[in-house]
Amino acid sequence: MLLRSADEKDIPQLIDMRIAFLTEEHEGLSKEQIRAIKAQLQDYFGRHLGRDLLVFVCEDGDTIISTVFLLITERPANPNFMTGLIGTILNVYTLPEYRNRGLAGSLMETAIEEAKRRKLSYLELKATKAGFPLYRRLGFVPDESEHTPMKYRIEKV
């Protein structure tokens, strides 16, 4: 098995891995939703992959079997992120038949090292129940803030 960074030739498999992840996380995705997501992902990966989106993959032969996405965002610096650079971890996903082999952990370690190399101030993620023990083991801690996270939804889902 090979761990590496994804590139443009991997986009079709990255789309498949994202859809597999979303299908597990969101029961009842319709065919129309999947079709719309695939179309957006094709464009998104083409514009962002290797720039502000780094994707670390594990392959078995020519098949991507595990992924970790690292989205890098630059914001005006403040005391909580002095470099202005923040990383968001997304789509930590391993195909079911390859789970419990340490693949996601190895890819997460790679993402953490890349974040350090790029001088990101911190990494953030939203942990699933399944992923929580891995993230704790890697040093992630629950984010406690005096501020309340909020959002305003423009588009109805």
Image (cartoon, rainbow, N blue to C red):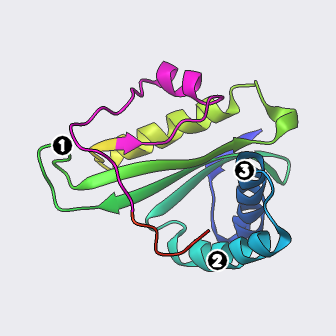
**Where 130 sits versus 82, above or below?**
above
User: Which secondary structure, mark 2?
Assistant: helix
Segment tinted magenta in the rendering:
123-151
Residue highlighted by disc 2: 40
- Quadrant the N terminus occupies: top right
Q: Quadrant of residue 104?
A: top right
Image location (x, y in percent) of residue 39: 71, 79
**Residue appearing at x 58%, y 55% in the figure:** 55
**Residue appearing at x 60%, y 35% in the figure:** 128
Amino acid type shown at disc 2? Gln
Instruction: Measure the C-alpha gap from mark 2 to mark 1.
Output: 32 Å
- Quadrant the C terminus occupies: bottom right
Instruction: Measure the C-alpha gap from mark 3 to mark 1.
Output: 31 Å
- Which is nearer the N-term, disc 3 or disc 1? 3
**Residue appearing at x 72%, y 77% in the figure:** 36
Residue highlighted by disc 1: 80
